[in-house]
Amino acid sequence: MSGKIFLHIGPPKTASTALQIALENLTAPTYRYLGALQPRKRDGATVANTLHRAVNTGDPDLIRDVNCSLKNLVSQNMVCALSEEMLSLYQRGITTGTKMRRLGVILSGLPVTVVVTMRNPVDAIPSLYQEIFDGLDLSYKLSFKRFCESNIVDCYDYELIEKECTNAGLPEIRWLTFTSIASKKLSTEDVFGTDDLWGAVDVDFQVVNVGSKLPDGISREIKPITLRSLGSHWAVKKTVDGLSLRGSRIYSLVSKLSGYVIVRDRRSRVLTVPKLIGERLTRNYERLCTGNGKTFANSSDLNS
């Protein structure tokens, strides 16, 4: 058997953590799990962590390090799995498409299967919004609709991910459904295909990092907005930078204290993805779930 790389790119809130734990728990003489590790505090020096930094920065040294590490393992006929759900998520001005293109460069010359965990976007987007709320710009905190219109949710445009991966030279994609993972209905063959080393045994998924809804089953608790959130507004950023305050002692003190001043209380909300956005993303999701000649796992479980 020749070596192979399986790279899980997320997106978040699609049972990624459960998959990461399951991949780490698999053992075989010619298998290596290269991160991410759960809990995340264990994840410092993994190849997956270095890969994530290489994608976010485009640093040529990091790109070379990751490529060389993986080529060395492949040359030893190792089957390697990496998982980093943030690889598909827009971050700090770096789009989903840019990340896929950088992955194509980093993984050049390697046998790679990209693994994507899929969940209906109208369910995943509210869960993501709730989880990353603290780090969002003020405009998104004030408007879930505006958040849904941003390129943050491109990670749930599975047609876009398919296109960008293919254009980046990563055409081999394996689609795993959230429902199949949550209901523990995947085997190692579903994940690794012909590179399965375990004889199609059931994957041991754990229930972890579950999104939290209120007892009514539809509402979500949204964290309060503090005065610190105003610092993400463009006008405030421009003023701070214009006065060269960033990094100063007074800036640090004001930033710390502003985190205790609540300008909008914690509240419960039913987060509904706008109709046109939800329909478009769901249509792309359902097309891939029905196969359409693509590699996928247990799409029939979607309606279970």
Image (cartoon, rainbow, N blue to C red):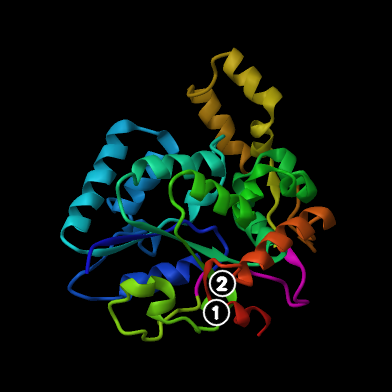
Q: Is residue 90 visible?
A: yes
| Mark 2 element type | strand
Q: Is residue 302 magenta?
A: no
Q: Which tag is nearer the camera, tag 1 or tag 2?
A: 1
Q: In screen coordinates, is 31 left or right of 165? A: left
Q: In screen coordinates, is 135 left or right of 30? A: right
Amino acid type of the residue tagged 1 in the rendering: Asn
276 versus 297 height, above or below: above
| Count of marks overlaid on the render | 2
First to last magenta residue range: 208-220
> What is the crowding at mark 1: few (fewer than 14 residues within 10 Å), some, or many (at least 20)?
some
Considering every residue shown, the one lying at the far top of the view is 243
212 versus 275 height, above or below: below
Residue 168 position, x and y percent, is 46, 44
Q: Is residue 263 visible?
A: no
Q: In screen coordinates, is 190 left or right of 300? A: left
**Label 1: which residue?**
298
Res. 243 image quadrant: top right
Which residue is at 73% across, 62% downward?
283
**Image quadrant where one finds the C terminus:** bottom right
**Label 2: which residue?**
177
Looking at the picture, tell me which residue is in the foreground, 292 or 277: 292
Looking at the picture, tell me which residue is in the foreground, 7 or 151: 7
Magenta stretch, overall SS = loop
> What is the crowding at mark 2: few (fewer than 14 residues within 10 Å), some, or many (at least 20)?
many
Res. 159 image quadrant: bottom right
Residue 149 position, x and y percent, is 75, 45
